[in-house]
Image (tube, rainbow, N blue to C red):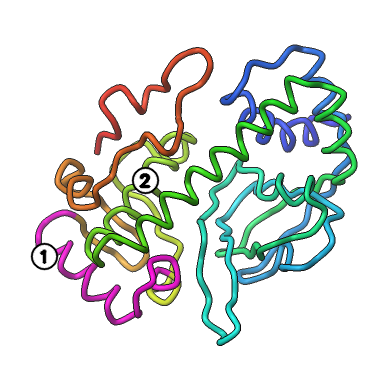
Amino acid sequence: MSLMADDILTLALKRLERRLALSAVDRSAFLRMPFYVKQMVPSAYIIREQDLTKTCSILLSGFAFRSKVLGNGGRQILSVNIPGEILDLQHAFLGKADHSIQMLTAGTVAFVAADAVRDIAFAHPAIGRAMWRETLVEGSISREWIANIGRRDARTRVAHLLCEIAVRLHAAGLITGNRYELAMTQEQLGDATGLTPVHVNRTLQKLRADGLITRDKRSITIEDWKALSAVGDFVTDYLHLETEHGPSSILNGGYHA
């Protein structure tokens, strides 16, 4: 196996090892799984709702999102995915997609055979448990998004989303300061928070006027983390950033701008 192949699957392996310690044998088996890589354009479907599952995808670069489209044509964005995340473990085990996953930006995706994912989960119980934990965390994030949309006001919803993206990028080592690229249009932010694009724009403008954030095209700079997280009713617990070996550094005082 080439170094390039090792590097690609290592992204997903590191993700799982945040959930559970794996042996050298486990790691070697994981890196031997067959896969192919595909360059994706914005809005391209990784998998569509109702598709039968043949692969399990790993986001190597760019951003993606999960969504469901309702009978009236309305779209609800269910989560935003960042590089290094395994996008559809649940689909690999359920056999049929119950929601769609699309690219938010241009990026690269590795597709692993679903049969290989299922086989390795049962042949290597530690890998299976790590996958189980990963899907449980996805469920935890989904519950937080339901609460965000269902019970928080517009200002709190948007602030919460901005905080979550910052913390997840920080935990993945993709940012180190207080600025990041927000790869979402106002329409997409509206689909993620249950707001109209106009309401999203007004809310972002108010957060900026209050000195909590600044915006430059699609970049967000968090100017006052403590105030923004308070406005967003944001606590990191639901992200389950801990590992078996203790809490990650991001929980030691939280994200610092």
- Which residue is painted at 30% across and 34% down in the image? 255
- Which residue is painted at 58% across and 66% down in the image? 67
Would you say residue 53 sits in the magenta stretch? no
Q: Which mark is residue 166?
A: 2
Which residue range is magenta in the image? 189-212
Query: Could you tell me residue 181's position as x and y percent?
Result: 40, 56
User: Tag 1's secondary structure?
Assistant: helix
Looking at the rendering, in which quadrant would you find the N terminus? top right
Judge from the rendering whether residue 126 lies leftward or rightward of residue 202; answer left or right: right
Q: Quadrant of residue 42?
A: bottom right
Residue at the far bottom in the pictured view: 72
Query: Could you tell me residue 89's position as x and y percent?
Result: 71, 44
Query: Could you tell me residue 146's position as x and y percent?
Result: 43, 57
User: Camera-side residue: 255 or 237?
Assistant: 237
Q: CA distance from mark 1 to mark 2?
A: 20 Å
Mark 2: amino acid: Ala
Is 196 placed above or below 148 here?
Answer: below
**Magenta stretch secondary structure, dominant:** helix
User: Tag 2 or tag 1, which sits nearer the N-term?
Assistant: 2
Mark 1: amino acid: Ala
Give the residue at mark 1: 209
Q: Residues within 10 Å of mark 2 (few under 14, many from 20)?
A: many
Query: Could you tell me residue 41's position as x and y percent?
Result: 66, 68
